[in-house]
């Protein structure tokens, strides 16, 4: 069977041993990168809360977009 090797999902460019998606320990690096990218655990939680509320039908796409923009503007604090 020809299995195409895929790169580590953390973005380091290394190739993990199949069938792992990560070089050992890099799943935590990836997790921390995602949290940093979101602006911290609180902002990531807020973002996911917005998605949950949208998926529950409590807000529409316009309000979801506004919520995301509001979160994004909080990230650009100098
Ligand atoms: Zn990696």
Image: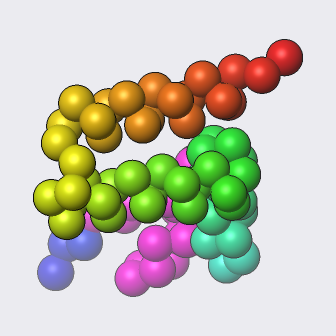
Residue placed farthest to the top in the image? 78
Q: Residue at x 63, y 64 (%)?
A: 31
Residue 34 is one of the magenta-drawn residues: no
Q: How is the image coloured?
A: rainbow
Residue 15 at what x, y percent from top left? 53, 62
Range of the magenta residues? Answer: 4-23
Res 76 → quadrant: top right
Q: On the picture, is 41 further left or further right than 14? A: right
Q: Residue at x 29, y 36 (%)?
A: 63
Q: Residue at x 37, y 29 (%)?
A: 66
Residue 21 at what x, y percent from top left? 46, 72
Q: On the picture, is 8 further left or further right than 56? A: right
Q: Nearer the viewer, residue 6 or 42?
A: 42
Q: Is residue 72 above or below residue 29?
A: above
Give the quadrant of the C terminus: top right
Residue placed farthest to the right in the image? 78
Q: Nearer the viewer, residue 12 or 36?
A: 36
Is residue 33 at least partly visible in the picture? no
Is residue 51 at least partly visible in the picture? yes
């Amino acid at each position: 069977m020809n299995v195409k090797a895929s790169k580590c999902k953390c973005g380091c460019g290394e190739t993990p041993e199949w069938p792992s998606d990560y070089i050992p320990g890099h799943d935590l690096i990836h997790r921390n990168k995602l949290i940093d990218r979101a602006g911290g655990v609180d902002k990531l939680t807020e973002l996911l809360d917005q998605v949950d509320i949208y998926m529950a039908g409590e807000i529409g796409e316009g309000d979801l977009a506004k919520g995301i923009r509001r979160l994004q503007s909080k990230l650009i604090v100098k």
